[in-house]
Image: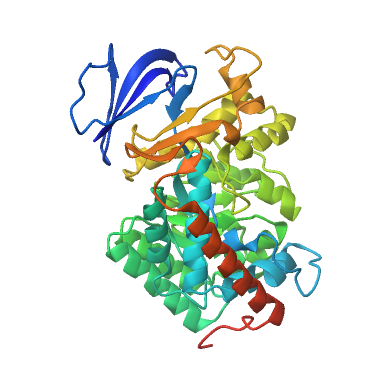
Amino acid sequence: MAIILKNATFIDWQSLKFREAHIRVEEGPRGSLEFLERIPEQLPEHEDTVLDCSGKLVTKAFGNAHHHVYSTLALGMPAPPKKPAHFYEILEFIWWRLDRALDAEMIEAGALAAAAACAKNGVTFVIDHHASPNAVDGSLETIARAFDRVGVSHLLCYELSDRDGESARQAALEETENYLKSGGQGLVGLHASFTVGDELLRKAVFLAEKYAAGLHVHVAEDAMDQKFCWRDYGKRVIRRFNKAGVLDFDKTILAHCLHIDDQEREIVRNSKAFVVQNTESNLNNNVGVFQSRGLGSRIMLGTDGMHSDMLRSAGVSFLIGQSEGVTPAEIYRRFREIHRYLAKNHFTGDGENNLVILNVDSPTEITPDNFLSHFVYGIESRHVESVIASGKLIVHQGKILTVNEEDVLRFSREMGKKLWKKLAEGTADGIAGC
């Protein structure tokens, strides 16, 4: 099948050149775009979808380089048993309690709801970082199936950590290897240096080498990560990871990188790794503001589980970055860097037939000369009218076509209540089998 976009204003995502054209969008993981001078009067039977894009913008769909879809059911959850005084307590009293409470149904519900939200926001590729120490087995496949149902492509990993004991660690290693061995598109996930011992770090790098994967790890999100790394290993986080081989992979992703010094920035810049900026999460956790100086150009944008709206993330990242001279062109480049990462590493699911149709009710004209200004100040997720993923229409006029959104939300709300009940009762604070 194919989709024909009639009277479209196409914006090339790399050059930002505008082109008025009819576009034939071929379906499939390697589907291409064809620009037509005219639309045939009689279309082949299989080309049964024609969308009138008069007055609308068509461009490449978006990607999220660092998500935590397991946090989807957290919105509105009960307050923690103690108000966190610092970042470690935010993890201890909120996020680690939540991930221990997750079961298979909750993981599925959260993934479906997150995938639906991504799709409606024009996001057709998600790089996710998962944790559920009491429901490890099959968790990555559960997320993959949920995203496939909605039509959003993915690159997944399970968060390896020593924090929950030997049994949970071993289960996580097995889940990672099973997913990669089965052909799942994934990375080897690590939480952060301060919860990853040397033995686990060696095993993680070994798995990445064995399956030609990279690692996806949190780096110096808070200054405590550096403090504990120096205390326990006599070196700073980036030097520890670099010595272990984490930065030797083209596929490696370093999330956050807030509290790193100039020498560490040089190591990252001269490595193969990519960095992900997560501005809103950093602001929410009061851990500092991302500084890009000395890191080079391999910087992507993520939401860190705060939400699934990459246009919002880009806008906030631009505003906070103005203090170090970040321009609209630079934040747009970071917004699009995920496509370069995925292409460089030959991941599937982010082809040129992933498109978003924007119906922008701008009070002023949008032109090639002022598009970047509109990108940071004017274009919002509410302007996403339709979304095409791998050549298939998955959102049309704001409605998801691949799943019943009411059923998805009903399921997620049911599982949200179940999760909150466990958190309120404190019944999931331990680890099964430990």
Apparent side of residue 76 relative to residue 122 in the rendered image (left or right): right
Note whether residue 274 is visible.
no
Quadrant of the image for the N terminus? Answer: top left
In the displayed image of the protein, which residue is found farthest to the bottom?
433
Q: Nearer the viewer, residue 412 or 217?
A: 412
Apparent side of residue 287 relative to residue 52 in the rendered image (left or right): right
Quadrant of the image for the C terminus? Answer: bottom right
Apparent side of residue 104 relative to residue 346 in the rendered image (left or right): right
Note whether residue 199 is visible.
yes
Percent x, y for residue 31?
26, 34
Compared with 355, 255 (above or below) is below
Name the residue at 64% across, 43% down: 262
Residue 394 in which image quadrant: top left
Compared with 175, 257 (above or below) is above
Q: Nearer the viewer, residue 300 or 310?
A: 310
Residue 61 in which image quadrant: top left
